[in-house]
Every structure is written in structure tokens, then in C-alpha cells.
Amino acid sequence: MAQERQRIVDFDTQWEAAKGRWEDRLDAKLTRRYNRVIDAAAFEVLNANSHYRVFDLANPFNDARTSYFHKSVGGYHGAKLRRYQEFIERVLTPERATVIQSIQSGNFNLTADMAPGLAMLNTRYLLVPGAEQPLPFNGGLGPAWFVDEVQWVNTAEEEVGAIAGLDPARTAAVHQSFEEVLGRVGNPGSDEVRLAQYHPEGSTYEVSSDKGGLLVLSEVHYPVGWTALVDGEDVPLVRVNALLSALKVPAGSHEVQLQYEPEGWGTARGLSRAGSLLWVILLVFCGWMLRRKAE
């Protein structure tokens, strides 16, 4: 009996000790999860008001979790744009390797010359595997900016190849097929660009410059359905740096609108509304007929 009693006492003591260890582990795990949620909430609020992008160094192009909370450079979709997939393979993947190597060597001053592709995609933070806090990327160029000059290229291969040695804040690589549309492009002088309103299907920018010039938008160029307006007047969009949209803006202060209205969208929207109206009329008619029969 004495041995059994001692075993019970020992069990209680050991169980209390084990329970304490598990509670400590659970508390630590819950604390880490709570902190991650708090960080995500903070990022969500900041992202809603500052319009930068985040790049997850862990698995950026096969994981969509980052995109749930942030405007993300990466993410996953089964139907990616071919041009963006090429940009991932030719530009972003090598830049990711360069950034990781820099971090591992202790250099945390990450700038645009190290990763011009990330810079022109307006990247501001890097999510580093195992790190509690995001790492600032100091090269993000903002939602839109004027460039000083154009570097003309003859092929798509030259266009994407030019990015590695490009200073995207000053120079835009442009395919020669857009030369007639753009004409001469020079230094805009003193300039200012502000994103006044953001929406995935169209944003509004307030811009001003002394001489006018080429305004680069940190948005993927897709010619079908996307249009640009300067003070309400249509202006052609061109592709720059193999991926982004740009347009020529005259000197002075202007409102630039980027909007998505694919051909046939207005007709489809009208037909949809007409169909909904017919359903409402049919339901009202059926209700009237049922009430009439009941009477």
C-alpha cells in the first residue's frame, strides 16, 4: 500500500511538472501565433493606406498565403500571365537568390541596384523565413514615377535582358514597336506623383512636372481592356521594362486614370441587368397569379 501511495504521489508530482512544461510550450506557441496575427493585422491596415508590395522569400511563387494579407509580388494561380511567368523566371528568381545571399552574408541594406525588378514592382518589405519581423527593402519606387530617359530595344529578349543593368528610377527599357507612339522622351524636370485612389480595376494618380515625360505605372501591362486617361482624354499605354505599363504625360498638373473596361463589358453588363429585371417581373407576375387564384 505504501508503495502504491508513493507511486500516486510521484505520479501527481510528475504530472504537474509535465503539465507545466506543456503549458509553457502552449503559451509560447499561442504567443507566437498571436504576434503573427497582430503583425498581419498591422500590415493589413498599413497596406490599405500605403499601397506597397511584400515579397516572401520562402516560397513566393507557389504559395498564396502572403497574398491573403498583403499586396504581394508573388502568390499562386494556375493561370498566370505568360509574360509575368517569364519575368518571374528571368528576373525575380535570380534577384531572390541575390537578396538571400546578401542577407546570409550579413548585408541587410537591400537597394534597387541589387534587385531592380523588385524595385519597379514597388516592393517595400521582405518576409524572411524564421524571422519574427519583416526586413525593409529600400528600393521600392512607389505606385508610379517619371523616368528621365528611354532605352530602346529591338527584341523581347533584349527588353527583359536590359533589366539586370537598369536603374528603373531613371530609365525605362522600351521595345522599338512603341517608338512611333511615344516619340521623343526626355527629363521631366521637377515632378511629383501621388496615388489619389487605388482599385485593382483602375486607379487615379495626381501628377505634375515641369516639362512632361514618360510616367511608369507599377502595374502589369495588359493591352486588352486597359485604358488610360489624362484629364479625361484617352492616351495610349505602352509596355516598358518587359512588364509594366507607361504613358506620356504633358507638362503641368494632370489627373491620370487607369481603368479596366474590356470590349463588350458594357453590353454584357446591360444584358445582365435586363435579365435580372425580367426575373423580378416574372416573380411579381407569378405572385400576382397565385394571389388571384387564391381569391
Image: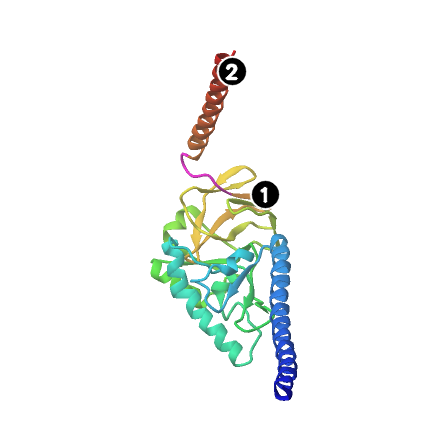
Quadrant showing the N terminus: bottom right
159 or 260, which is in the foreground? Answer: 260
The residue positioned farthest toward the front in the image shown:
1
Indicate the amino acid at tag 2.
Answer: Arg
Q: Position of residue 274 (x, y in %)?
A: 45, 25
Element assignment for label 2: helix
Q: Which residues are magenta?
A: 259-264
Residue 30 got which mark?
none
Q: Classify 10 Å Cα crowding around label 2: few (below 14), some (14-19), many (20 and above).
A: few
As drawn, 36 above or below 295: below
Residue 67 in the image, given as x and y percentages of width and height: 51, 57
Query: Where is 106 relative to 238, above or below?
Result: below
> In the rendered image, is residue 70 in sight?
no
Q: CA distance from mark 1 to mark 2?
A: 56 Å
The secondary structure that dominates the magenta segment is: loop
Local crowd at mark 1 within 10 Å, few (<14), some, or many (≥20)?
some
Q: Nearer the viewer, mark 1 or mark 2?
A: 2
- Comes first in the chain, label 1 or label 2: 1
Q: Which residue is mark 2?
A: 291
Image coordinates of residue 223 in percent, x first then y, are 41, 46
260 to the left or right of 141: left
Where is residue 278, by image quadrant?
top left
Give the residue displayed 51% in from the left and 77% down from the top: 102
Please state which amino acid type lies under the numbered disc 1.
Answer: Glu
Q: Decide: is 259 above or below 35.
A: above
Relative depth, front residue between 4 and 9: 4
| Residue in the foreground of this view, choosing between 90 and 27 | 27
Q: Residue 144: x, y in percent?
A: 55, 53
Tell me, yes or no, whether the highlighted magenta stretch contains residue 263.
Answer: yes
Determine the secondary structure under disc 1. Answer: strand
Q: Would you say residue 248 sits in the magenta stretch?
A: no
Task: Write down the residue under mark 1.
Answer: 255
